[in-house]
Image: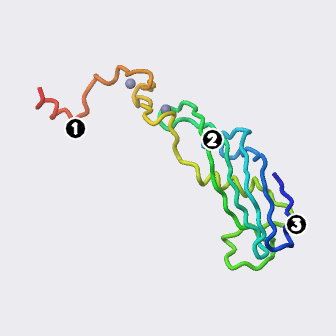
Amino acid sequence: MIFDVMAILKTDGARIQLEGPLTPPSNLQGEGFVFSEDARFSGELENIGGVLELSVCAEGTFTVPCGRCMKITEQRFSVSVHETLVKEGEEVSDPDEVIPFTGTSIDLDAVIWPNVFLALDTKYLCKADCQGLCDRCGTDLNEGPCNCKDDDIDPRLAGLAKLLQ
Ligand SMILES: [Zn+2]
Ligand SMILES: [Zn+2]
């Protein structure tokens, strides 16, 4: 969503409430993340001494394969975003800490999504106690044990098993 900041750009202390939809990104497909159309943000933008302080909450849902059994699972995200936006060419003490913009419009998707990506976990599970797949036969162990289990005993435990007999 492109937002016009003309109304507060010139007035120190001016603020506007913001809310709206976020356009789902397509560049995380490789990781298996697919964002839904329901992503939204709300919060405010305030002119503090000539720079614009963005403070919003971004929320939505996405699907991702379970990190153990690969079943597609739906997850929610809710991320607080705080960024300082500065008109390109302005002097700032730490350029790495601010996001430059040109003219009077800001692409909020470009500002907000990177914050959402940073807040994502690397692995999501379909349920906390997901049993995963058998690494030998590929059976989904959530649906019951496979036949591999009794075949042989881990060599590290074999000695112990003997002692117990
Ligand atoms: Zn799972
Ligand atoms: Zn198996």
Q: Tell me if mark 1 has few (under 14), some (14-19) or many (20+) residues whose alpha carbon lies within 10 angstroms of its own.
A: few
Q: Tell me if mark 3 has few (under 14), some (14-19) or many (20+) residues whose alpha carbon lies within 10 angstroms of its own.
A: few
The residue at which mark 1 appears reads as 156
Which tag, 2 or 3, sits closer to the chain's start? 2
Query: What residue is rendered at 16% in x and 34% in y?
Result: 160
Of helix, strand and loop, which one carries label 2?
Answer: loop
The residue at which mark 2 appears reads as 33
Dot in front, 2 or 3 = 3
Does 132 sit above or below residue 10?
above
Q: Tell me if mark 2 has few (under 14), some (14-19) or many (20+) residues whose alpha carbon lies within 10 angstroms of its own.
A: some
Q: Quadrant of ligand 2?
A: top left
* Residue 28 occupies quadrant: top right
Of helix, strand and loop, which one carries label 1?
Answer: helix
Q: Amino acid at mark 3?
A: Gly
Of helix, strand and loop, which one carries label 3?
Answer: loop
Which tag, 2 or 1, sits closer to the chain's start? 2
Q: Position of residue 150 (x, y in %)?
A: 28, 22
Q: Are marks 1 and 3 in contact (CB under 8 Å)?
A: no
